[in-house]
Image (cartoon, rainbow, N blue to C red):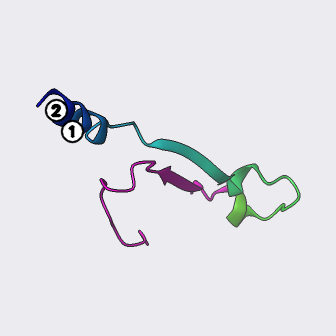
Amino acid sequence: LRLNSSLYLAKSKTSKPSCSLHNFYLPALNLSDNSNTTRSNHTLYFQLNLNNKMKDKGVRYDEII
């Protein structure tokens, strides 16, 4: 019985997903483009990457547009 409960605890161990930010871009800070449109563009572009190391547990979702 003790061996079975140890195996269950080892299998149910969880870990936190990792999160990283890639391709961060602010058009208004682009000094090489002198247009007024770019300067007044207050949009923030970024790519958020999430990595779940637990292969048997997790949430699946489609690409966010």
Q: Position of residue 62 (x, y in %)?
A: 37, 72
The structure residue drawn at horizontal position 39% and vertical position 56%, both measured from the top left corner, is 55
Rounded to the nearest angstrom, the CA distance separating label 2 from label 1 is 5 Å
Q: Nearer the viewer, residue 32 or 47?
A: 47
Magenta run includes residue 57: yes
Q: Is residue 18 above or below residue 46?
A: above
Viewer-proximal residue, 26 or 62?
62
**Which residue type does callout 2 highlight?**
Ser
Contact check, label 2 and label 1, Cβ < 8 Å:
yes
Q: Position of residue 46 (x, y in %)?
A: 59, 55
Q: In the rendered image, which quarter is residue 36 located in? A: bottom right
- The residue nearer to you, when weighing 12 against 4, is 4
Q: Is residue 25 visible?
A: no
Q: Residue furthest left?
A: 1
Residue at which label 1 appears: 8
The residue under the point 23% across, 30% down is 6
Q: Residues within 10 Å of mark 1 (few under 14, many from 20)?
A: few
Residue placed at 64% from the left, 52% from the top?
A: 22
Q: Position of residue 41 (x, y in %)?
A: 62, 59
Q: Which residue is mark 2?
A: 5
Q: Which residues are magenta?
A: 40-65
Residue 53 lies within the magenta run: yes
Quarter occupied by residue 27: bottom right
**Amino acid type for the residue under numbered disc 1:** Tyr
Dot 2: what SS? helix
Q: Quadrant of the N terminus?
A: top left
Q: Can residue 52 be seen in the rendering of this structure?
A: yes
Q: Which mark is residue 23?
A: none
Label 1 element class = helix
Q: Nearer the viewer, residue 10 or 48?
A: 10
